[in-house]
Image: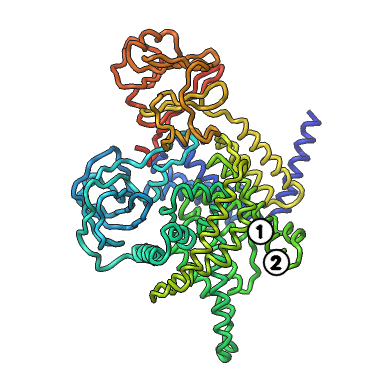
């Protein structure tokens, strides 16, 4: 007993010493505490009532009092920011977004205002808001358009159409992209497709600021199309203004597989280029006016110009999360110049994440947020490694820094790429070595020059050079993508594993002293938990049923199943497969089928997949679970646990163990669920 108390005392003293040594950097952990509160909110199975806000507001006030009194300050600061994270996302979810359509409906002669126009490969896509003539109380609709779209329609105009609309789709598995939640926080109440021509109802005489910005984006895209091929225009649209809907799916897959997708997300590369360019230009121009330069601090004036231009560019680029992060960090650098203070990279990361999580708390769950902050945090934390390893020759230094930064960023984002996309690209380091210089020195400067010249219809002067560099980039990417073995597939990681990895990563990057290397142990532990995670044995909905066989691969039961459908490809990818495999006979270890249905037997437990009532009655007493795979009158005499066909409009996943059959349905009682 004495030994235990001594060990506890030593651990306590060690923790107190480490906390004391890290007091000056504890402020950096504030957004992490925010994030804990946000994660708690999204982890709830039921939507918290508005009464909870009152209690949390009271606790926030109590915490604020204790912080002001400086009693137990670390404890109450921690609780305060955790509660702040929770309450910020609940307030946004309940008071700043619209309602969700509950079921599929046909709407006729609806009048709405156009907010976005996207040109895709086979159709156009509109986002329309301010819906009139609808009784469903919806705010915005994302509409696919294969019918005729009036050429005179532009952003801010009122249009009239008929359409079939339905609720945004929920996740097809526990590991999938939940579009219903994403759409809810983007104020998209419904999605659908037009069944009539989209007619101009009323031309807009005045527009909101957001509509003007979207109109500028659309006009830039039209300028790109004017003198460039469609493929090059779409690539440049993604690189310069963040509109990547028009890129062909095969090209986009190649870009992802070669690890250069970050170039197509408006981020530090783009914002630092724009800010640095205009800071240098304005400073060089102002210094020409000798009297002005002697009277005023042109460095500070140039800093203000750089911040303003960066903000304008961020708005035109659509304000993605990675762009917001980069803008805030770039602004912190220039604000440091304005107030004559040294810039601290860790503090600017903390400020950026705090602001983003305060106003867009839902972004914490997005791959963009996680990967953007992971990459920049790793690069800042490894700054000393760059100083030691990079040689002083300028050209060698530049390419060495690309290799090192690509390697570090790739390792930092690896767990999040695996968690969200179930693969990792080894090709990233090699592809970035060529793609980053081409993009930085040729594509972006020529692209900006092209747009400026396009204002006076002189863009053709640089169109050939610009198109050639874009084609070179795509050629390099496609060539690298052909090399076998550069893309490693993973099965889905659990949320627990990614939380452990993130905690370890943060500890490794932010903590001072040797104790920080305990974070490395957590990262390794998290990867072990992720790799040892067991994916579901059965996944199904009304249109698809797939089962895992002895070889660990998923197979579609229905021989007519569309193996390349979105759901089947998603399920296959999350099981570490390139594609769903066809149902096979003769070698089945777990599955036995006949015309009336199938029986899946694993670890002594039987799951019946039934196509008619007779088959249910024949096997009712011999199985542990029944899945009604077709519409028929389910026999009430069978009392075995079953999943009714009417409930399979959303997906289910099933794990079979020695002790139980675990069922998880992709539906919930949250405010964005239908």
661 or 5: nearer the viewer: 661
Kindly state the secondary structure of the residue where label 1 is placed: helix
- Residue 395 is tagged as 2
Q: In the rendered image, is residue 62 in sight? A: no
Q: Residue at x 57, y 65 (%)?
A: 440
Q: 274 or 145: nearer the eye? A: 145
Placement of the N terminus among the 4 image quadrants: top right
Q: Nearer the viewer, mark 1 or mark 2?
A: 2
Instruction: Determine whether the residue tagged by mark 2 lies in a helix, strand or loop.
Output: helix
The crowd level at tag 2 (other Cα within 10 Å; few <14, some 14-19, many 20+) is few
| Along the viewing direction, whichever of 558 and 321 lies nearer the viewer | 558
Residue placed under numbered mark 1 in the picture: 402
* Quarter-of-image position of residue 557: top left
**What is the count of numbered marks?**
2
**Horizontal side, residue 607 vs residue 190: left or right:** right
Q: Nearer the viewer, residue 330 or 150?
A: 150
Quadrant (top left, top right, bottom left, bottom right) of the C terminus: top left
Pointer 1: residues within 10 angstroms few (<14), some, or many (20+)? some
Please tell me whether residue 177 is drawn above or below residue 429 in the rendered image: above
- The residue lying at 39 percent from left, 42 percent from top is 180
């Amino acid at each position: 007993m004495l030994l235990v108390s001594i060990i506890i005392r030593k651990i306590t003293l060690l923790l107190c010493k480490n906390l004391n040594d890290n007091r000056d950097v504890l402020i950096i952990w504030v957004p992490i505490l925010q994030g804990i509160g946000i994660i708690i909110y999204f982890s709830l199975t039921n939507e918290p009532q508005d009464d909870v806000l009152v209690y949390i507001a009271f606790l926030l006030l109590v915490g604020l009092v204790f912080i002001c009194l400086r009693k137990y300050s670390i404890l109450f600061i921690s609780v305060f920011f955790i509660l702040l994270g929770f309450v910020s996302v609940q307030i946004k979810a309940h008071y700043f977004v619209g309602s969700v359509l509950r079921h599929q409906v046909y709407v006729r002669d609806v009048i709405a205002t156009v907010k976005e126009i996207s040109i895709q490969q086979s159709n156009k896509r509109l986002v329309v808001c301010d819906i009139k003539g609808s009784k469903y109380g919806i705010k915005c609709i994302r509409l696919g358009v294969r019918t005729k779209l009036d050429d005179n329609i532009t952003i801010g105009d009122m249009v009239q159409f008929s359409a079939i609309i339905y609720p945004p789709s929920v996740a097809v598995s526990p590991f999938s992209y939940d579009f219903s939640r994403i759409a809810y926080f983007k104020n998209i109440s419904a999605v659908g497709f037009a069944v009539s021509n989209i007619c101009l109802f009323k031309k807009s005489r005045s527009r909101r600021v957001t509509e003007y910005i979207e109109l500028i984006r659309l006009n830039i895209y039209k300028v790109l199309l004017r003198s460039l091929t469609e493929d090059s225009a779409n690539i440049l649209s993604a690189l310069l203004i963040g509109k990547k809907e028009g890129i062909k799916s095969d090209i986009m897959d190649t870009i992802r597989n070669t690890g250069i997708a970050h170039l197509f997300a408006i981020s530090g590369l783009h914002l630092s280029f724009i800010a640095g360019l205009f800071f240098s230009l304005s400073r060089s121009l102002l210094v020409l006016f000798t009297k002005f330069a002697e009277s005023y601090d042109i460095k500070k004036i140039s800093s203000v110009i750089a911040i303003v231009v960066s903000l304008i560019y961020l708005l035109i680029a659509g304000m993605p999360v990675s762009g917001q992060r980069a803008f805030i960090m770039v602004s912190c650098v220039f604000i440091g110049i304005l107030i004559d203070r040294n810039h601290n990279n860790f503090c600017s990361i903390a400020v950026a994440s705090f602001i983003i999580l305060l106003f867009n708390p839902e972004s914490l769950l997005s791959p963009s947020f996680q990967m953007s902050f992971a990459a920049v945090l790793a690069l800042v934390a490894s700054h000393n490694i760059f100083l030691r390893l990079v040689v002083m020759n300028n050209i060698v230094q530049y390419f060495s820094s690309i290799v090192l930064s690509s390697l570090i960023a790739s390792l930092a984002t690896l767990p999040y790429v695996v968690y969200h996309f179930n693969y990792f690209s080894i090709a990233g380091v090699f592809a970035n070595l060529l793609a980053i210089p081409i993009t930085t020195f040729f594509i972006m400067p020529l692209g900006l020059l092209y747009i400026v010249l396009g204002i006076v219809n002189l863009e053709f002067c640089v169109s050939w050079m610009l198109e050639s560099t874009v084609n070179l980039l795509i050629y390099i990417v496609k060539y690298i993508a052909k090399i076998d073995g550069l893309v490693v597939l993973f099965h889905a990681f659990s949320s627990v594993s990614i939380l452990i990895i993130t905690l370890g990563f943060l500890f490794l990057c932010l903590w001072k002293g040797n104790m920080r290397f305990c974070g490395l142990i957590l990262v390794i532990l998290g990867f072990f938990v992720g790799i040892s995670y067991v994916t579901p044995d059965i996944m199904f909905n009304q249109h698809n049923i797939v089962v895992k066989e002895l070889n660990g691969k998923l197979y579609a039961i229905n021989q007519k199943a569309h193996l390349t459908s979105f759901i089947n490809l998603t399920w296959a990818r999350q099981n570490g497969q390139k594609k769903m495999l066809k149902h096979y006979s003769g070698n089945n270890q777990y599955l036995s089928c006949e015309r009336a249905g199938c029986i899946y037997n694993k670890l002594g437990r039987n799951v019946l997949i039934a196509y008619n009532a007779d088959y249910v009655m024949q096997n009712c007493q011999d199985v542990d679970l029944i899945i009604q795979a077709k519409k028929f009158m389910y026999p009430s005499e069978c009392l075995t646990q079953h999943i009714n066909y009417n409930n399979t409009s959303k997906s289910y996943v099933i794990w079979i163990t020695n002790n139980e059959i675990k069922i998880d349905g992709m539906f919930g009682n949250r405010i964005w669920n239908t």
